[in-house]
Image (cartoon, rainbow, N blue to C red):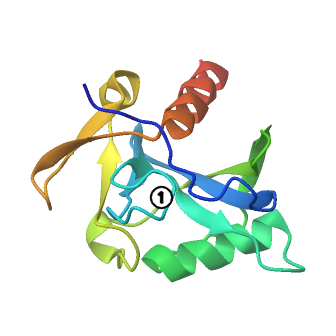
Amino acid sequence: MISSSPINSNLNKPHAVVALAILQQDGQFLMQLRDDFPHIVYPGHWSFFGGHLEPGETPSEGLQRELIEEINYRVDNPIKICSYYDEQVTRHIFYAPLTVALTELILQEGQDLALLTLEDIRQGYAYSKKIQQTRPLGKIHQQILLDYLKLEL
């Protein structure tokens, strides 16, 4: 069985604030296969692009910066759809269409990127052509997408 539990090597970390992007194209969702570094959350899992906010950044500004840093993709007006809160992190979730081909994106963080299907999301895992392995979705990322799909229906 594939585990989808995050690691947390430092339980005393301050509360994190992140902005994450649901990037959709033709009914599929762009996801990043995170690196296999043991010190990061959800190593080797599929997750959203986005990341931690810098001091003074709004969630929208942080998301726009992270997308440029991670895949060289510019989103001018991401639509905030919700936020998820827990004891360790606040996740601001945004939607934007993916308007370019995958070949135009420059992956600068993570092992792979791919457009995941609804079936991938529901199953909770997807195949990476680059590393030729099936890997799980991060549990919270899968839940956010499943919640988003309920809103779409």
Work out whether residue 115 can be spotted: yes
Hey, which quadrant is residue 20 in on the image?
A: bottom right
**From the viewer's perspective, is 127 left or right of 62?**
left
Residue 76 visible in the displayed image:
no
Above or below residue 90? Residue 73 is below
Residue at 26%, 39% (x, y): give it. Answer: 126
How crowded pointer 1 is (Cα within 10 Å; few <14, some 14-19, many 20+) is rated as: some
Q: Position of residue 74 (x, y in %)?
A: 57, 76
Q: Horizontally, is 38 left or right of 24 in the view?
A: left
> Residue 87, relative to residue 120: is it above or below?
below
Quarter of the figure with the N terminus = top left
Return the residue at label 1. 98
What residue sits 78% from the left and 60% below the top? 17
Q: Nearer the viewer, residue 36 or 153?
A: 36
| Residue 140: percent from left, percent from top | 57, 36
Q: How many marks?
A: 1
Q: Secondary structure at mark 1?
A: loop
Towards the viewer: 107 or 78: 107
Amino acid type of the residue tagged 1 in the rendering: Leu
From the viewer's perspective, is residue 144 above or below residue 110?
above
Residue at left offset 44%, top offset 75%: 71
